[in-house]
């Protein structure tokens, strides 16, 4: 594994362009949560000409629905959910200036192409590590769609949140690279 | 006849829901440690180290192992000499799930299929009852995450497809799933009975201690063959490339209809939770 790259949000085109698939990144600053139901509402809001709950320009959306916080903690377990379910929504948000998504698993060809066209990155976080990842979240606040419970949009303040670059803005794809390297024929 | 008050069932279920979500079973933990030894990819090794560290933190009650605390899948083996008093057994199970998910700070993940409105208390659980000889009640709670469940499938193969068809189906399913179900995964395969019976067998296969072979030697060989083929796919931990894609394949088989060859693949993520109690 290579060196670790530290990034602070919001992200610029310059930040994005230096990232390559497979890079280990530690993210600090504010990131926003959103998964299935929140994305559906955000896209419906856009279609109606309404404002989004936050300006996506330069921001990162983390695909997560945390478990309830235990007393004295800002958030419960908070690992990534599977990203392909956001395929119908992510390209629209990337086109509006969203710079990153954090999730797990594959996303669509369209998402990959949007990452190249609009200079964005799809980061992977390790799934099933909710307890560990929750420790990198210092503050959590619901900013929209509270009725959705775990699916509400939250503003998170993170410190050294560990991710890996899955799709970079140059067409690189960590999963493709990894499988090519370790696949055994026959 | 032995009398059991259903309040005992409520308490047991609540406790099992909490324990299952905070304490990774020892067999799974050991299998992950072995995977860390075996994995050749540095990225894969880093993922496995993080998974093991996370299990420790969850055990210390920092937070549940995974934010997806699952749909509560409950298996009940009820001794036929047991008589339940104090109310409805089903309601007692529901109450146990409500209590466990509330008191354990567990995520409630059940919702309306179309409005997606959250039910709010993680009911209904999925309950599998079995009546067995004796006067005991065995309860297994196996919370099941949505990510890996979404990658599962039942295929109604033709008898002509045979064992090779089943093996192909399983390997292809895992290949298509890639990193989505949080590998390294455990693969439950059910071949038998009808459409729903095969799915049940695949689910039940996931409850077996990780890597414990089927007692039938021939089936144990099939499990091994499928496992080897899966681990040649190169998917690796989290799908980022590597040599350990699955920790184990568990195959369960029963007779089928002469027209059918139902093949169910139920995938479990590495957070393979199950806790049990005998009352």
Image: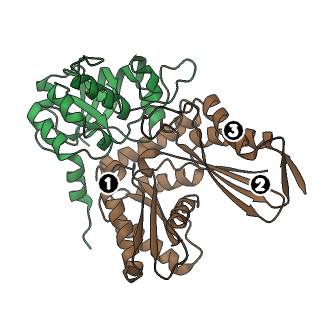
Chain colours: A green, B brown
Badge 2: residue crowd in 10 Å (few <14, some 14–19, many ≥20):
many
Circle 1/circle 3 CB separation < 8 Å: no
Q: Give residue B137's mark.
A: 2
Q: Please tell me how crowded label 3 is: few (under 14), some (14-19), or many (20+) other residues with Cα within 10 Å.
A: many
Label 1 neighbour load within 10 Å: few <14, some 14-19, many 20+:
many
| Mark 1 to mark 2 CA distance (whole Å) | 39 Å
Could you tell me residue B259's position as x and y percent? 46, 80
Q: Which secondary structure, mark 1?
A: loop
The Cα atoms of the two marked residues, 1 and 3, are separated by 35 Å
Q: Secondary structure at mark 2?
A: strand
Q: Is residue B72 above or below residue A15?
A: below
Between A120 and B57, the residue placed more toward the observer is: A120
| Percent position of residue A41, x then y | 32, 27
The answer to whether the residues at label 3 and label 2 have Cβ atoms under 8 Å apart is no
Q: Nearer the viewer, residue B64 or A63?
A: A63
Please state which of the two labelled residues, at mark 1 or mark 3, is closer to the viewer: 3
Q: Chain of mark 3?
A: B
Q: Is residue B175 above or below residue A53?
A: below
The percent coordinates of residue A172 (x first, y second) are 15, 44
The residue identified by callout 1 is B178
Residue at x-position 49% and y-position 47% = B271
Tell me which corner region of the image, top left, top right, bottom left or bottom right, holds residue B131: bottom right
Q: Nearer the viewer, residue A57 or B29?
A: A57
Identify the residue under disc 3.
Answer: B96
Q: Quadrant of the N terminus of chain B?
A: bottom right
């Amino acid at each position: 594994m290579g060196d670790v790259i530290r990034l602070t949000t919001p992200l610029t085109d310059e930040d994005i362009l230096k990232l390559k698939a497979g890079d280990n990144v530690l993210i600090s600053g504010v990131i926003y949560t959103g998964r299935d139901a929140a994305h559906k509402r955000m896209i419906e809001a856009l279609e109606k000409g309404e404002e989004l709950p936050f300006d996506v320009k330069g921001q990162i959306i983390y695909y997560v629905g945390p478990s309830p916080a235990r007393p004295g903690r800002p958030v419960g377990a908070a690992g990534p959910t599977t990203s392909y379910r956001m395929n119908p929504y992510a390209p629209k948000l990337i086109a509006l200036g969203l710079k990153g998504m954090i999730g797990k698993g594959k996303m669509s060809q369209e998402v990959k192409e949007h990452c190249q066209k609009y200079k964005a990155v799809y980061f992977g976080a390790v799934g099933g590590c909710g307890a560990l990842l929750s420790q990198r979240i210092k503050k959590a606040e619901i900013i929209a769609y509270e009725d959705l419970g775990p699916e509400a949009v939250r503003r998170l303040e993170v410190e050294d949140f560990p991710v890996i670059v899955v799709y970079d803005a140059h067409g690189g794809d960590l999963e493709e690279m990894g499988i090519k390297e370790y696949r055994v024929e026959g | 006849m032995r009398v059991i008050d259903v309040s005992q069932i409520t308490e047991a279920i609540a406790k099992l829901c909490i324990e299952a979500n905070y304490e990774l079973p020892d067999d799974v933990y050991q299998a992950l440690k072995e995977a860390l030894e075996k994995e050749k990819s540095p990225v894969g090794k880093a993922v496995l180290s993080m998974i093991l560290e996370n299990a420790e933190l969850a055990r210390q009650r920092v937070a549940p192992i995974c934010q997806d605390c699952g749909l509560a899948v409950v298996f009940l083996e009820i001794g036929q000499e047991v008589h339940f008093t104090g109310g409805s057994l089903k309601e007692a199970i529901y109450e146990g799930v409500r209590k466990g998910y509330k008191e354990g700070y567990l995520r409630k993940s059940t919702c309306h299929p179309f409005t997606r409105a959250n039910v709010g208390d993680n009911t209904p659980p999925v309950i599998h009852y079995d009546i067995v000889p004796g006067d005991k009640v065995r309860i297994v709670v196996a919370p099941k995450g949505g990510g890996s469940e979404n990658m599962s499938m039942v295929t109604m193969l033709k008898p002509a497809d045979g064992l090779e068809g089943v093996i192909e189906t399983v390997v292809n399913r895992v290949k298509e799933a890639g990193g989505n179900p949080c590998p390294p995964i455990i693969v439950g395969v059910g071949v038998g009975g009808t459409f729903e019976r095969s799915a049940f067998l695949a689910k039940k296969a996931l409850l077996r201690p990780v890597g414990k072979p089927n007692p039938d030697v021939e089936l144990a060989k099939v499990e091994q063959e499928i496992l080897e083929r899966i681990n040649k796919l190169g998917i690796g931990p989290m799908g980022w490339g590597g040599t350990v894609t699955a920790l184990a394949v568990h195959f369960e088989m029963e007779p089928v209809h002469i027209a059918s060859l139902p093949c169910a693949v139920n995938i479990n993520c590495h957070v393979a939770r199950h806790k049990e109690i005998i009352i």
